[in-house]
Amino acid sequence: MSPWRRLRESRFWPMLWKEFIQMRRDRLTLGMMTVLPAVQLLLFGYAIQTDVRHLPTVVLDESRSVESRRLTQTLENTDVFTVVGEVPTAEALRSAIESGRANAALVIPPDYETRIARGVPARAQLVVDAADPQSSAAALSGAQLAAQARGVEITSERLGGVPIEPPIDLAVRPWYNPAQRSAVFIVPGVIGVLLTITMTLITSTAVVRERERGTLEQLIVTPIDKPSLMLGKLVPFMLVGYVQMAVVMGLGSLIFDIPIVGSLWLLTLLTAAFIFASLGVGLLISTVARTQAQAMQLSFFFMLPNILLSGYIFPRAAMPEPAQWIGLLLPLTFFLRILRGILLKGIGMAHLWQDSLVLVAFAVVLLAISVRRFTKTIE
Amino acid sequence: MSEPAPAGSDREADRAMHGATHGAPNGVAVETRGLRKEFGALVAVQGLDLTIRRGEVFGMLGPNGSGKTTTIRMLCGLMQPTAGTARVVGHEVTTEAEAIRRKIGYMSQRYGLYDDLTVEENARFYATVYGLHGRERTARLDAHLSELGFDSRRRQIAGTLSGGWKQRLALACATAHRPEMLFLDEPTAGVDPAARRRFWETIYELAGRGTTILVTTHYMDEAERCQRLAFLSRGHLIGIGTPAEITRQFNEPTIEDVFITLQRKDEAPV
């Protein structure tokens, strides 16, 4: 048989044809394909704001002076704090924080202004509800910023209005994300997380469904070869993955103004490795799960470490070492570096070859294991 | 064609009637020797010796867990035997499963239909997987589907068919490639009597064209429609022959009585 005819009559085509018909009729999968990317994007793009702003703050001003009001004003200028009211006593301050009306409280003692006038260090206090460490960290830096700014002003006034240049200017230049928006960091990650969810979930449930309904058994007694069976089943899902990626990137640059700096061709190519790795995980789940519900549960169970440990939201550098090691077992960890590297930094294979190699290794190993297990379970 | 073939016909006559139609080298469709399957400590099939002739409608009877389905699954290449040999349509199951798959059809009680595909799409899918293409496929499917009465239902979604029609479609999907041998694993479970009768008529038409048929069933009236029967209990053969031979041999009025007696005897504590 000629190679052309062999290709034309390959049993891969009827499998592919069947999968596409089924996908077209399956409203849920179609919905997942198009709506899920958009929902995820908006959800994560808007909701995940790691930069803390506008902490509700109360003021216990016992100084009641020009200086105390200027300190309050400087504090508010940082944007970290928003003054929501004054409290008359220390008890009222406590109750404001306990009730949650305020997350921070500025306490200015009676001698605040007189100490400034005398030229001795004036003291004030900022109480923070540090139950949420992210707020307290933001409050800490905000307070320091405010104190420093006001301090420089006072010194300048004392010297007769001469502007003061600080002796050291350590300028921070935020590359790749100059406005330091969370969305720029999060949105490329949404692509990776989304692909992980859909690839593992669709694959595992689709294969388990065929086993549950007895169609897999029926297929095995036909002369279909294993590669055609698997490829015909998986290739459509791969296309779903690319559609989702396109939706997220399109909406991401439209709504969140996400820069796309690097080569889309390279990204498309490397995404294939990640998709194959995720399909492998899905297939692996399908060999363990007996029912579609189990497949779904296992897929979500796999999602959790991916969201938490891959560096999607929380920087991996901030994690304890064991958590970092677990993160290294997840393909997403490496794919996120590739996504952010290409989309935000515009870097190429010169810097990405290691991550790419790991990803390809993941894909090969996961697919090999899952295909072997899959073949075993259908016997 | 709805009546079973005359019972008790001798083996030579049988072979002359059905064996030659497929140009069989030796007139044997299935031959097993010491076929055995273990699942861990459980022995599902133990030392099965079975010969099924070409063109025969061969019935396999036995209670649940007697090893009927396991035997069929081994013969179709769905499972590897633990020990023993089996030849199906001239090929060894352990080494030539691919060749066997091209020549057989298989229908289980779960039907193996895609509920979200139409009648036509299901048939077309399986026909293509079995290697039919182009005009030949179109012509074959047109004739086949209309023969089975699907003319007005070709575009119906398979999931919305009634049990009897689903069973018919499953049969259509398993036979469009004109298999030499058809394996039917409890094909009529949960189908109404009228549909069952129609189904058996089709089975006899297929057998008349020389297709060998191996069918498992729980229904005694279906068992009596088979040309020969094998009784399985706890994984081994406890009786084989034509329905008439069997009732005579065991001196019972009906197949059902034989079945119950044999089963009771086999399961009795030793």
Image (spheres, helix red, strand yellow):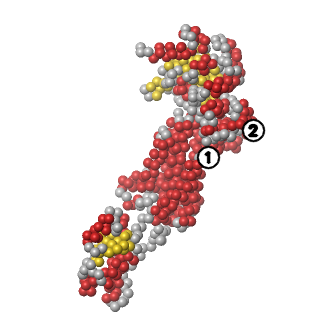
What is the three-letter code of the residue carrying label 1?
Arg
Q: Which mark is residue A175?
A: none
Residue occupying the point 57% across, 29% down: B190
Mark 1, residues whose alpha carbon is within 10 Å: few (<14), some, or many (≥20)?
Answer: few
Q: Position of residue B80 (x, y in %)?
A: 53, 29
Going by the image, does B61 lie left or right of B25? left
Q: Position of residue A127 (x, y in %)?
A: 30, 70
Count of labels shown?
2
Q: Is residue B70 visible?
A: yes
| Contact (Cβ within 8 Å) of mark 1 with mark 2 | no
Going by the image, does B205 lie left or right of A342? right
Residue occupying the point 41% across, 61% down: A315
Give the structural element (helix, strand or loop) at label 2. helix
Which residue in the protein does label 2 denote?
Answer: B135
B9, above or below B74, in the image? above
Chain containing the residue with disc 1 = A
What is the three-letter code of the residue carrying label 2?
Arg
Residue occupying the point 36% across, 89% down: A162
Which residue in the protein does label 1 denote?
Answer: A25
- In what quadrant of the picture does the N terminus of chain A appear? top right
Q: Position of residue B164 (x, y in %)?
A: 63, 31
